[in-house]
Image (spheres, grey):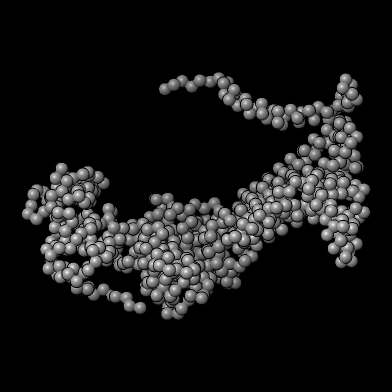
């Protein structure tokens, strides 16, 4: 038998991955960490400030406001898009030409570039020339998203629902198609009601795609930038200014690199933490006997 | 309690069938008696699952009627037919416990919870699932899941027939035997009509009292395992049942017997008379490998064959031979010496079957077996 060789040569084999990850993730993040602990005046003048920027950011009312707004937005989006997406998937035709047609129709919003989505809704919702805005006003409802914060909020929500519900719908559609016909046949023989079929066959088997859907939608909505930026520019006032936009204003608009870096990291940790919490909670549900 | 009768039943998946080939089920009349254990045996694609789904009501037949105890049920949906079906891949409700799975059909029927409880406990005991009642169905093994899906049928006191669609496909071999015995035991205990679809002749013959062999959308023979073996009614039954299947040789009719290449197989006079009335050229002779007589040496009337090869299967041997250009399989006992190079065989008259247009030419007096007429 050949003697086992013990040395560190295996490290060479994983080296390419290390290099790739270093350049794609670790180096950029460390740059941000570097900025977040210094006060930089110019290229040659920088002072180490420790956790000062972090403390300051966590007390900054403007950022805390947008953080609150951001959470509210993300949870609203999930609360609307997940049930709506499931409902759409359930009523989509499964066979024949209509299945293909409906798939394409549902997928269209996903194929539109994000800033175009913003532009579409910007025009579509305008009270003077937009089809939607004009129609709502014609019904006697006072609606103007450029001046009324509630209207602005609802428009941003509606836009996101329009843009991203198809993702949940398509994921669920694929999940539903993966359920063998025998389950429905057995359920019929067991005299299960439509609700019982949904509750005991469809929903449990959609769980894995829903985990992906919820995580993706949470992360994406929590980092939303382009569409509201184009649609409302964050206004009126700051009513639709979400975290990314606040951060960009700070980093690029005011060039406050240190505080912006500190805030980026806090932002990043929040996304990571919430995703982790979601994931663990769902897995725990699974394990419960 | 149900007797299931199929009357002029046919089914096509095409909306406008034109030729017989368009039919998954060709017109048939058949009866499954109350309380019987039946198998529906056939190769993949012969229409056996289609037939099962028509009986359970998951599929509406394009022609003919399904009758339960003489009552037409064509328009009655599966949930009202008082049948249960066990599928090839176990169907359990993952998110529920075993108890809730078994209780599910009863709860859907709005039966009071204490009745549900006692019935579930009773059936779980029969199926040996009592210890698992509190477990999530998701974590069960395949055979336990299959028992749970059968249990969902058994809990209902109104169930009069259980249909099985290849239920042992995903079960480990050593558990197949156990589960099959359980099925048999349940059949005896509950007096329920059971129809068991399979492509495995061993499964069919251990489970069923009577087997219906399906081929090309038709039931070509319905009989006990022994009848199927000793007197295959159709060339396909001969070929499909048995291991290896029947030797079938295409032959031509002559005045003195049946001939292939230069070999003449003589027939008894009655058979000769029967064949005189036949006009088709599709004639085959068939003999099971078990029934070919192998002589120790040259014998009068024996055919000389070339021995091609021998497979030793422990308790028996299968010899492959060539007789005048036709390959034959012959099965002999393990103790018999295997002929080398040349072998001398003959076909005992009682085991030599003649098939005209694939169907057996039956010259014996019909035995006093019950004939089904619809």
The image quadrant that residue B266 belongs to is bottom left
Give the mark count: 0
Q: Residue B189: image x %, image y %?
A: 40, 68
Q: Residue at x 76, y 54 (%)?
A: A161
User: Can residue B85 be seen here?
Assistant: yes
**Where B159 falls versus B331 (above or below)?**
below
Instruction: Describe residue A192's horizontal placement relative to residue B242 as left or right.
Output: right
Q: Residue B26: image x %, image y %?
A: 39, 69
Q: B119 and A82: which one is in front?
A: A82
User: Can residue B95 be seen here?
Assistant: no
Instruction: Describe residue A44's horizontal placement relative to residue A197 as left or right.
Output: right
The residue furthest bottom is: B70
Q: Residue at x 64, y 56 (%)?
A: A103
Q: Residue at x 80, y 47 (%)?
A: A227
Q: Residue A12: image x %, image y %?
A: 59, 22
Q: B188 and A105: which one is in front?
A: A105
Q: Quadrant of the C terminus of chain B?
A: bottom left
Instruction: Describe residue A12's horizontal placement relative to residue B185 as left or right.
Output: right
Instruction: Describe residue B14's horizontal placement relative to residue A58 as left or right.
Output: left
Q: B121 and A48: which one is in front?
A: A48
Q: Residue at x 14, y 45 (%)?
A: B342
The residue furthest left is: B300
The image quadrant that residue B214 belongs to is bottom left
Q: Quadrant of the N terminus of chain B?
A: bottom left
**Where A115 falls versus B359 (above or below)?**
above
């Amino acid at each position: 038998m050949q003697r086992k060789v013990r040395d560190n040569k295996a490290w060479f084999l994983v080296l390419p991955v290390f290099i790739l990850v270093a350049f794609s993730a670790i180096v950029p993040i460390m740059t941000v960490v570097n900025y977040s602990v210094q006060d930089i005046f110019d290229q040659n003048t920088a002072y180490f400030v420790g956790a000062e920027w972090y403390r300051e950011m966590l007390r900054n009312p403007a950022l805390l406001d947008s953080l609150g707004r951001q959470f509210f937005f993300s949870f609203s989006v999930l609360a609307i898009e997940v049930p709506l997406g499931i409902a759409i998937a359930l009523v989509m035709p499964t066979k024949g030409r209509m299945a293909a047609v409906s798939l394409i129709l549902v997928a269209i919003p996903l194929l539109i570039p994000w800033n175009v989505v913003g532009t579409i809704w910007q025009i579509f919702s305008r009270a003077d020339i937009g089809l939607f805005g004009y129609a709502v006003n014609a019904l006697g409802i006072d609606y103007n998203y450029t001046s009324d914060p509630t209207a602005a909020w609802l428009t941003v929500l509606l836009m996101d629902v329009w843009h991203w519900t198809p993702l949940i719908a398509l994921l669920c559609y694929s999940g539903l198609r993966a359920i063998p016909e025998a389950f429905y046949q057995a359920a019929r023989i067991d005299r299960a009601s439509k609700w019982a079929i949904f509750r005991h066959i469809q929903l449990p088997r959609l769980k894995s795609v829903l985990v992906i859907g919820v995580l993706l939608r949470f992360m994406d909505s929590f980092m939303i930038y382009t569409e509201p930026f184009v649609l409302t520019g964050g206004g009126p006032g700051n009513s639709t200014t979400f975290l990314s936009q606040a951060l960009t204003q700070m980093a690029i608009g005011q060039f406050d690199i240190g505080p912006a870096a500190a805030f980026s990291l806090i932002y990043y940790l929040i996304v990571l933490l919430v995703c982790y919490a979601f994931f663990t909670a769902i897995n725990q549900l699974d394990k419960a006997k | 309690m149900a007797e299931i009768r199929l009357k002029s039943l046919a089914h096509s998946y095409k909306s406008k069938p034109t030729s017989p080939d368009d039919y998954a089920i060709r017109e048939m009349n058949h009866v499954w008696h109350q309380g019987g254990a039946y198998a529906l045996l056939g190769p993949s694609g012969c229409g056996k699952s289609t037939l099962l789904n028509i009986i359970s009501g998951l599929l509406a037949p394009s022609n003919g009627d399904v009758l339960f105890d003489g009552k037409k049920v064509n328009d009655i949906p599966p949930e009202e037919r008082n049948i249960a079906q066990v599928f090839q891949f176990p169907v359990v409700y993952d998110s529920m416990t075993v108890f809730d799975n078994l209780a599910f059909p009863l709860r859907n029927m709005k039966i009071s919870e204490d009745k549900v409880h006692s019935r579930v406990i009773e059936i779980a005991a029969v199926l040996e699932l009592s210890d698992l009642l509190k477990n999530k169905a998701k974590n069960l093994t395949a055979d336990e899941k299959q028992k749970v899906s059968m249990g969902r049928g058994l809990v209902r006191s109104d169930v009069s027939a259980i249909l099985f669609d290849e239920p042992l496909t995903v079960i480990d071999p050593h558990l197949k035997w156990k589960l099959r015995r359980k099925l048999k035991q349940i059949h005896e205990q509950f007096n329920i009509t059971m129809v068991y679809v399979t492509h495995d002749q061993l499964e069919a013959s251990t489970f069923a009292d009577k087997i219906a062999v399906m081929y090309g959308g038709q039931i070509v023979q319905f009989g006990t395992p022994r009848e199927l073996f000793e007197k295959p009614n159709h060339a396909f039954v001969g070929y499909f049942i048995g291991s290896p299947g029947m030797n079938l040789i295409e032959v031509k009719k002559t005045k003195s017997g049946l001939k292939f290449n230069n070999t003449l197989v003589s027939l008894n006079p009655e058979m000769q008379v029967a064949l005189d009335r036949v006009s088709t050229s599709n004639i085959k002779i068939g003999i099971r490998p078990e029934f070919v007589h192998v002589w120790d040496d040259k014998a009068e009337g024996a055919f000389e064959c070339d021995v091609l090869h021998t497979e030793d299967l422990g308790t028996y041997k299968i010899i492959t031979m060539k007789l005048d250009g036709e390959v034959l399989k012959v099965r002999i006992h393990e103790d018999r010496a295997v002929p080398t190079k040349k072998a001398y065989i003959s076909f005992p008259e009682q085991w030599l079957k003649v098939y005209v247009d694939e169907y057996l030419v039956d010259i014996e007096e019909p035995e006093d077996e019950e004939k089904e007429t619809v």
